[in-house]
Image (spheres, rainbow, N blue to C red):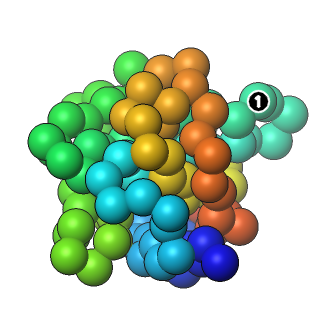
Amino acid sequence: EVQFVESGGGLVPAGGSLRLSCAASGLPFSGGAIGWFRQAPGREREGVSCISKSDGRTYYVNSVKGRFTISSDNAKNTVFLKMNSVNPEDTAVYYCVADSVFDSCSGSGWPDFWGHGTQVTVSS
């Protein structure tokens, strides 16, 4: 059974920082990619950031480039998202995701495996 343990969400003031963590277990593949999607109220889910477990390639949606940093501990199947200089537009439920293919975790892709999500709220 695939499980994700997501943590780190909460309320943060605009301009502040937050660090999301996700530990995945039971994934039916050893490589692939792991990352984060988000869904803001009234908006579609979008890929935020993703990292390849095999070669460390990363993907960031344009709106977070230069502010968010993704990293992973492959030995523990854990991914982190450091969020700096957050703004109210970053308010969303953040979902940890994983897929055997990097492209499914980035851009317009759609990962096969999803966590339950953690709420991030940025106050103005």
Snapshot quadrant of residue 51? top left
Image coords of residue 78 (percent x, y): 33, 71
Q: Is residue 48 left or right of residue 123?
A: left
* Residue depicted at x 48% and y 21%: 107
Image coords of residue 113 (percent x, y): 62, 54
- In the rendered image, the vertical position of residue 27 relative to residue 6, given as above or below: above
Q: In this rendered view, identify the residue nearer to me: 14 or 45.
A: 45
Q: Is residue 21 visible?
A: yes
Q: Secondary structure at mark 1?
A: loop
* Residue depicted at x 42% and y 26%: 103
Image coords of residue 31 (percent x, y): 30, 53
Snapshot quadrant of residue 5? bottom right
Residue that carries the numbered disc 1 in the rendered image: 44
Tell me the quarter of the image containing the N terminus. Answer: bottom right
Image coords of residue 10 (percent x, y): 57, 72
* Residue depicted at x 64% and y 64%: 115
Q: Is residue 40 left or right of residue 51?
A: right
Dot 1: within a 10 Å radius of its alpha carbon, few (fewer than 14), some, or many (20 or more) residues?
A: few
Q: In this rendered view, identify the residue nearer to me: 87 or 73.
A: 73
* Residue depicted at x 70% and y 42%: 39
